[in-house]
Image (cartoon, rainbow, N blue to C red):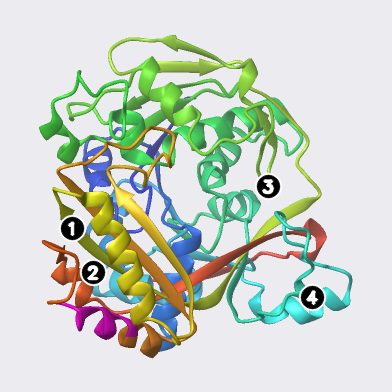
Amino acid sequence: MTLRIGSAQGFYGDDVTRALPMIDGGHVDVVCFEALSELTLAILRKDMLANPARGYTFDLNIIAKQILPRAFARNIPLITNGGGLNPLGAAEMIRDTAAKLGLRGLKIAAITGDDILASLTDLQAVGETFADMDTGELLAHTANQNFVTANVYLGAAPIVEALQNGAHIIVTGRVADPSLYLAPMIAHFGWSWDDWNRLASGIVAGHLLECTGQVVGGNSLALIEHIDPRDLAHLGYPIAHVESDGSFVLTKTPDTHGVVSLETVKEQLLYEVHDPARYITPDVIANFTTLTLAHDGVDRVRVSGVTGSPRPDTLKVSMGRMEGYMRELIFTLGYPHVWGKLAQLKAMIAESWRGLPIHRVEYHLLGVNSLFGNIAKAVDDPLELIVRVMFTADDPDTLKTAVRKVMANGLSCPPGMSVSGTTVGAEPRVILGLWSSLIARKRVQPTISYTEV
């Protein structure tokens, strides 16, 4: 029997209410909400420092109040990794909300075990080196140990178990994006954990679903001349109709705006993929190069032929650490002699900051080299130049001082220069550095906690 999986969130802040037309119309059997990124976890850590009861996404409040009652009434499970750094706290909030709404008989599952921040020392003592995947540097050898997050990318297994135990809503921490969607397929069809081709096909379905609006016409270069731009604010989110052999049809919520085409599917298929022949996930390594895409009707693309190979013995760990603070100022320089004015601006800033403990200063010319670098010859004397100046320091007060010193040159600046008032009045922002590593799978033990209303 076909399993219909809806995707209603692709990032923290996405419009999760787009799950409602899927649910109310009877178009889905399960809905997934993918909310996390490395940056999101850092934001949630900041929330927890202000209030230890937080640590999960605010979107979960909307899901609990507006979406869960209607999904529960139709026996449609919801799966979300919006639990972030505090799935247990998120489950408690959902329980309290459900009780107030009278959702008797609701079963909530909270999955933990991905957060290993408190265990880094113990894990190193038993042989986990946490070598940086980019540089090879060992965690113990790095000078900056100011880590604020350390989360393992879990796979589908604990979600499958929770679904099989009758959970109506499952809240996790860091689970790999496509694994959220793979889990209901395994639970529904009973696929074995070494059925690599089916698992890989499920991962491809999850990969296509996980970014919601992107596969239905959002962020699409192919459709830039073929979609009404007003529709971008009202896209119907994607749904996959999955068969027992792993093949599936990608479509969207019926009677909604957007387009599902071979082009949009290809664009999303290649999104964030380094090696299409070895797309590594906690559950399987998927090979995108064997799959076939076929038009299957209006807003329907059939995907088949995905192959896979055994899952790795290690899991990815993403750690975030504090690496100081940053600020930016945005200046506008106008014709004539723009390049001379830019040289004056740089010299003025350098002299103003002489003696300040600023670590980095970078200049980006918006509209000239900020996206593609210096691959094209600059115009000899442009009508205008937008200059973004980014600078960093160990503490926010140094950056505030730097801004004041530059602004003190307001009447001594290059001729005709202006500055964005919004950037002048902004506060310093924390710099979160990412440390990516691997951990032996056997060291990670997910835990499922159940709560009933």
Give the magenta-colored segment's residue range: 402-410
- Mark sitting earlier along the chain (3/1): 3
The C terminus: image quadrant: bottom left
Quadrant position of residue 261: top left
**Which residue is at a point 77% across and 65% down the rendered structure image?**
137
Q: Mark 1: which amino acid?
A: Thr
Q: Secondary structure at mark 4?
A: helix
Disc 1: which residue: 332
How many numbered discs sit on the rendered protein?
4
Residue annotated with mark 3? 282
Q: Nearer the viewer, mark 1 or mark 2?
A: 1
Q: Is residue 344 left or right of residue 138?
A: left
Q: Quadrant of residue 235?
A: top left
Question: According to the image, label 4 marks what residue?
Answer: 141
In space, the residues marked 1 and 2 are separated at their CA atoms by 54 Å
| Amino acid type of the residue that numbered disc 3 sits on in the rendered structure | Pro
- Gap in Å between the C-alphas at discs 4 and 3? 27 Å
